[in-house]
Each structure stands twice: as structure tokens, then as C-alpha cells.
Amino acid sequence: MDFKQLEAFIMVAKLRSFSKAANAIYLSQPTISSNIASLEKELEIQLFDRTSKEVNLTPAGELFLEYATDIINTRNNSIVEMSNFNNNISGRLNISASTTPCNAILPGLIKKFNDTYANVKFNIKEQGSVGIIKDILELNCEIGLVGTTVHNNKIRSYDIMEDELVIVSKKELGLPTVLTIDELLNCDFIIREKESATRKTLETALDEANLDNHKLKVLCEVNNLDAQIKMLKLGLGVVILSKALCEDLLKDENMQISTVDGLNLKRSMYLVVSAKRTLTPIATAFLNMCKEVYNLE
């Protein structure tokens, strides 16, 4: 049994396909098949049920996947620890961020980090908080930035700053600068997807005010900030946004922001990392910089 066999096994289990696994780790399909066959022969057990359309783990395969993942993680952690001795802050850092921190916080952090570590490149993925936590847990990224509290003992969260949500509209809609809850519920919303932390904050605030969040008049649900803003500028409805994202919008004299009387639309922004994973030197340096910026323990 060797690491290549285990990596092949894990990738086939993840993608449920020998051909997709081969492409993912840059091996030929016969090589992948040979690695799996050798592994099954050594273990004297069948790991996959193979059909013409899909490959699925057997019960024994499900059990072995846990051990294989632990072995690969142990190997990766040992490599990281050795790298730490060299203090080599170079390479690539994967960061996942939800819309507000991705647009309002992350650019400044990357600029500050790049001023010190010019040899680091970044992969930035903007997505909902649910996807970010999933990426952290599945080791697809090391650093996450979210706009909602995370309740998971496998995740370590750092409260980095307070954020306030506001209602943004075109002035022609005639909304007051302070909305009542009834006026809010009468607005047509161009709103983010259900996984969005901003939407969850609004719905939680309505729940806390003993209001059914299903009473929101949702004209359009989008998963993209740019599309949301374009519809807003056309006067199709209102959006709820972080106040930190409104600076450029308010340069347009046709736009305005409103607050909502009786709703708590304040929240915190969080930096999240795995509580079970040793960070790479790059991620450790980025986390330490954030701790310094935001005075974190």
C-alpha cells in the first residue's frame, strides 16, 4: 500500500468515476484502475461497486475511506511541519469569502499581506457561508471570511469586525430614510440566495421581532452581487446590503439608504479556519497578520 494508491482511492470515492479521478490527479485511467485493483487485492476486500454509469463505495470502502483520509492528512501535516522549519512564506493561498467580506474587507488584507510577502499568490473564491464552511472542512481552502456565526467544533472562528446592514433603493421609490417594519415588508426585494449570510441576518432579525420572514416580498433571488446591483439601479426593487458596500453606490445621487426601526441588522464578520488542521506557513502568516490588524487573541 502506498500514497499514490490511497490518493487514487480517495479521488475515485470523491468523484465516483475512474476517468474523472484520473483527470483530477493527472494520471491515466488504466493507472487509476491498477492502483485500486492492487489496493483491493492487498486488503482482500472490494472497495467499490462498479456500474456502467457510476462507481460507489461498498460498506467496507466507506470504512476504509476514513482511514485513507487520515493517512493522507497525516502525511500532508508532516510536510507542512517540515516546511515551517524553513519559514518559507511563498506559494499559493486559497481563501473563500462571502460577498460582503470578499468585496469590503479582503482586498485591503491582501494588499497589506502582499506588501510583506510578495511571493504569495492568491486563489479567491466568493460563495455563500455554507460553501465556505464546506471548503474549510474538506480542506479545499485554509482561510474563510463569513458574515455569520459558525457553530461547528471543527471550525475556529475569530470575530474581526462589526457590520451593519441597510436597505438600498432608488430615490424615485420614495422610501423614507427610516423604515417601519410594515414599510419594509411592503418593499419588493432583490435578495441574495438562501445560503447568503446577509439574507440570514435579515431573516433572523425578523424572527427575533416575531415576524414571519416568508412575508418578505421577494421579486428576484440572485446569487451574484453585480446582478443584484444592476437590478437595483433599474429601480426593480430594494436590496439589503452591508453599509460597507454602499460607498460607491451612494456616489450616484439617485440612490439612497434606509435603516429599519425595530430590527437589529447588526452582525459580525468572522475569519474562520479549521480547528483540526495545521495551517501552512502562508496561511499561518496571513492569520497572524489578521490577528494584528484586528487585535485578536
Image: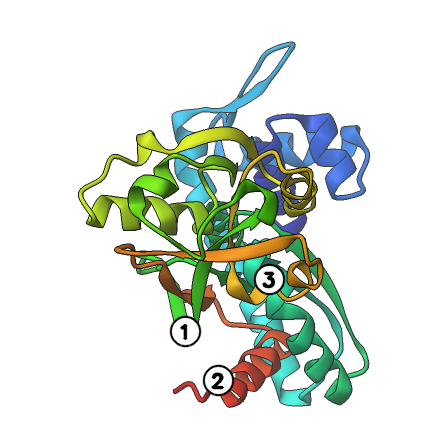
**Residue drawn at the location 63% of the way across and 53% of the way down:** 255
Whether label 2 touches label 1, CB < 8 Å: yes
The amino acid marked with disc number 2 is Tyr
Above or below, 216 against 281 in this view is: above
**Residue drawn at the location 51% of the way across and 39% of the way down:** 191
- Depth check: 78 or 232 in front? 232
Residue 229 position within the rendered picture, expressed as x and y whole percent measured from the top left = 66, 46
**Residue drawn at the location 74% of the way across and 40% of the way down:** 24
Residue linked to disc 1:
158
Residue linked to disc 3:
245
Residue 118 position within the rendered picture, expressed as x and y whole percent measured from the top left = 81, 82
The amino acid marked with disc number 3 is Leu
**110 displayed left or right of 266:** right
Residue 98 position within the rendered picture, expressed as x and y whole percent measured from the top left = 55, 55
Whether label 1 touches label 3, CB < 8 Å: no
In the rendering, which numbered label is found on residue 294? 2
User: Label 2 vs label 3: CA separation?
Assistant: 19 Å
User: Label 1 vs label 3: CA separation?
Assistant: 21 Å
Numbered disc 1: secondary structure:
strand
Above or below, 60 against 111 in this view is: above
Indicate which label's residue lies in the foreground, 2 or 1: 2
User: Label 2 vs label 1: CA separation?
Assistant: 9 Å
Above or below, 175 against 216 in this view is: below
**Within 10 Å of the Cα at label 3, are there few (<14), some (14-19), or many (20+) other Cα atoms?**
some
